[in-house]
Amino acid sequence: MSGQTTRDAVRLVTSIVVCEGAGLIGSIFTASAIPIWYASLVKPYFTPPNWLFAPAWLTLYLLMAISAFIVWRTGLDKRQVRVALGIFVLQLVLNVLWSLAFFGLHSLLFGVIVILALWLAILLTIVRFFPISRAAGALLLPYIGWVTFAAILNISIRLLNT
């Protein structure tokens, strides 16, 4: 393997581990809350079945990882790349924080606040990724779509349970 190929392989694996790791951390708060607390909530008619969430998130974290990798490989020596990846990390932290707020703390209101901040951070990430790589920006479109749906679901659950 050439030096560039090795660096790219390390960047890709690191991106996948970090993104899927965020999902794993979030699942720690989620798994125990689903059968008791979440099951007890009144949910809107459009709530997907529980089994759908894990494969959807696994796929989204993989797309996020590939997107981050594409941007990262263009070079951390560029300020534009460092800023874009910094915002990416912020949205990843907010992603984990949402799981903590909603499932860990059982706070529907804090969940709404965090998911709205997450949505804005994802949008800003997409806006910053597109000039660096259209592919990297496009890979995040399913993610913002899913978080848009999740925000509507979170807001609806909050309204139905207050």
Image (cartoon, rainbow, N blue to C red):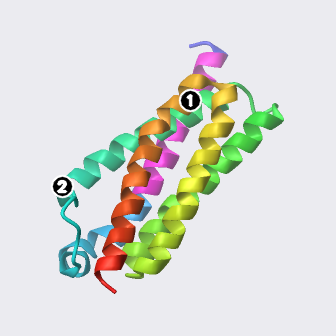
Q: Nearer the viewer, residue 123 or 74?
A: 123
Would you say the magenta stretch is mainly helix, strand or loop?
helix
Q: Nearer the viewer, residue 31 or 162?
A: 162
Residue contact at pointers 1 and 2, CB within 8 angstroms: no
- Image spot of residue 126 (x, y percent): 60, 39
Q: Which residues are magenta?
A: 4-23
- Image spot of residue 98 (x, y percent): 47, 67
- Image spot of residue 51 (x, y percent): 18, 55
Residue at the location (67% across, 49% down)? 87
Residue at the location (54% across, 39% down)? 15
Residue at the location (56% across, 49% down)? 122
Q: Quadrant of the C terminus?
A: bottom left
Mark 2 closeness class: few <14, some 14–19, many ≥20 residues within 10 Å: few
Q: Quadrant of the N terminus?
A: top right
Q: Which residue is mark 2?
A: 51
Which residue is situated farthest in the bottom direction here? 162
* Magenta span contains residue 6: yes
Residue at the location (62% across, 44% down)? 125
- Image spot of residue 128 (x, y percent): 68, 38
What element does badge 1 sit on?
Answer: helix
Give the residue type that dot 1 points to: Ala
Image vertical order of residue 136 relative to residue 115, above or below: above
Mark closer to the chain start, 1 or 2: 2
Q: Which residue is mark 1?
A: 136
Look at the image and tell me whether residue 18 can be seen. yes
What element does badge 2 sit on?
Answer: helix
Question: In the image, 32: left or right of 75?
Answer: left
